[in-house]
Image (cartoon, rainbow, N blue to C red):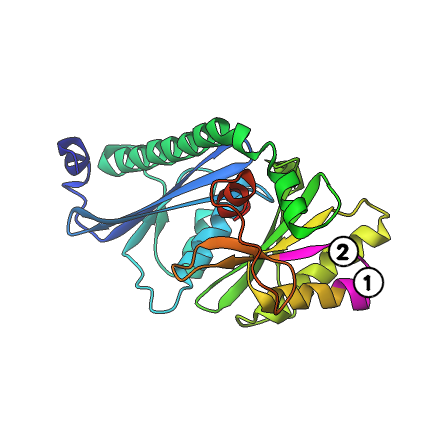
C-alpha cells in the first residue's frame, strides 16, 4: 500500500466496507474495500456485463454480497450516490452512507479510480486480442464437425453459497462479444445448486421465447460445464422444443480452468490446439 492510500484511511477507525462501481460500454466494474482497524485489510473486484441499470445491478450485488453464509457485517457501508441507501440500510440493518467530504469521501474516490482502471485494462486487452478471435468460430465449428456459422450463445451458472442462482448468457458474433444481446436469468424453479435443473430452466426459457418470437436461433450453444449441463441442454432442445442447434460443453482441467470442448457425453475431448484461435476463444472470451 502506498503512503497516500494509507493516509486516506488512517483515521477511519470504525470497521467499514466501501463498495463502488464504474460503468462503461455496458460493463460494470466493482471494487470492494474492507477497512478494519484503520487499515485496508482486503480488496475484492468484480467485472460483469450490465443487464438492467447500473444502480439496480449494484444494489442487487450488495444484497447478495452480504447474504453470503457466515459473512460478518461491518459497522457501516459506504456507497456512491445513486443508490437507495435507506432501502439497503433497512435490509442490512446497518448504516449505509455516501460521504460528501473527508477521508471516507477520499476512499470512495480511490475505489472508483481503481474500478475505472480495472475496466479500462479489460477493454485494452480485448482490443489487443481482437485479431486472435477472427478465425475462432471457424476453428470451433470445424473441430465439432458442424457447418460454419456466425453466432454463438454461451451459458454460465453462478450462485452464492448455493443460493441466489443466476444464469448469464453471453453472445458472440464472428468471435466478437455482442454485449447488446447479453442476458441474465434469475432462476425461478431451482433453489439450490443443481447443474442439470439450472440448465434445463434457462435453456427452456431462452429458446421457448425465441420460437414464440420466430427469432433466429444461434449456430452453436456452449455450456460452461461438463456432461451434466451438455446432456440437460440437449434433452430440452431436442426432446421438448424440437431444436437441432448443435450444443457443446466447455470442460475444465484439474485446475478448474476451461481447457477443451466436449461434443457428446462419453465422447473424447476434442483436444483443440492450445495455440489455436479456437482454444484461445473458449479459454478467455466465452467464460
Residue at left offset 34%, top offset 53%: 95
Q: Which residues are magenta?
A: 237-248
Q: Earlier in the sequence, mark 1 or mark 2?
A: 2
Is residue 87 visible from the viewing direction of this image?
no
Of residues 271 and 216, the one nearer the viewer is: 271
Of residues 246 and 194, the one nearer the viewer is: 246
Q: Is residue 46 left or right of residue 190?
A: left
Q: Is residue 164 left or right of residue 103?
A: right
- Quadrant location of the N terminus in the rendered image: top left
Q: Disc 1 marks which residue?
A: 241
Of residues 83 and 217, the one nearer the viewer is: 217
For residue 95, the mark is none
Percent position of residue 19, x then y: 37, 45
Percent position of residue 280, x then y: 50, 41
> Is residue 240 inside the magenta stretch?
yes
> Is residue 265 inside the magenta stretch?
no
Q: CA distance from mark 1 to mark 2?
A: 8 Å
Circle 2: element type: helix
Circle 1: element type: loop
Quarter residue 207 falls in: bottom right
Residue at left offset 57%, top offset 41%: 53
- Alpha-carbon neighbours of circle 2 within 10 Å: few (<14), some, or many (≥20)? some
Q: Disc 2 marks which residue?
A: 207
Q: Is residue 206 left or right of residue 29?
A: right
Q: Are marks 1 and 2 in contact (CB under 8 Å)?
A: yes
Amino acid at each position: 500500500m502506498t503512503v497516500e492510500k494509507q493516509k486516506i484511511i488512517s483515521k477511519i477507525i470504525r470497521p467499514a466496507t466501501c463498495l463502488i462501481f464504474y460503468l462503461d460500454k455496458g460493463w460494470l466494474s466493482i471494487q470492494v474495500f474492507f477497512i478494519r482497524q484503520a487499515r485496508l485489510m482486503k480488496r475484492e473486484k468484480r467485472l460483469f456485463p450490465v443487464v438492467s441499470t447500473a444502480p439496480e445491478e449494484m444494489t442487487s450485488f450488495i444484497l447478495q454480497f452480504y447474504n453470503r453464509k457466515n459473512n460478518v457485517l461491518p459497522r457501516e457501508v459506504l456507497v456512491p450516490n445513486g443508490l437507495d441507501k435507506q432501502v439497503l440500510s433497512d435490509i442490512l440493518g446497518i448504516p449505509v452512507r455516501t460521504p460528501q467530504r473527508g477521508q471516507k469521501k477520499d476512499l470512495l474516490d480511490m475505489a472508483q479510480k481503481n474500478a475505472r482502471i480495472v475496466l479500462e485494462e479489460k477493454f485494452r486487452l480485448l482490443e489487443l486480442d481482437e485479431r486472435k478471435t477472427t478465425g475462432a468460430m471457424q476453428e470451433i465449428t470445424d473441430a465439432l464437425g458442424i457447418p460454419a456459422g456466425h453466432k454463438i450463445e454461451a451459458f454460465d451458472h453462478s450462485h452464492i453459497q448455493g443460493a441466489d442462482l443466476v444464469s448469464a448468457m453471453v453472445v458472440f458474433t464472428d468471435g466478437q462479444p455482442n454485449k447488446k444481446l447479453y442476458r441474465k436469468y434469475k432462476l425461478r424453479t431451482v433453489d439450490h445448486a443443481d447443474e442439470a435443473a439450472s440448465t434445463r430452466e434457462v435453456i427452456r426459457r431462452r429458446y421457448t421465447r425465441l420460437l414464440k418470437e420466430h427469432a433466429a436461433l444461434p449456430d452453436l450453444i456452449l455450456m460452461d460445464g461438463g456432461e451434466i449441463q451438455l446432456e440437460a441442454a440437449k434433452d430440452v432442445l431436442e426432446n421438448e422444443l424440437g431444436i437441432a442447434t448443435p450444443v457443446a460443453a466447455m470442460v475444465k482441467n484439474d485446475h478448474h480452468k476451461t481447457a477443451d470442448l466436449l461434443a457428446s457425453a462419453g465422447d473424447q475431448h476434442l483436444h483443440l490446439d492450445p495455440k489455436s484461435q479456437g482454444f484461445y476463444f473458449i479459454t478467455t472470451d466465452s467464460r
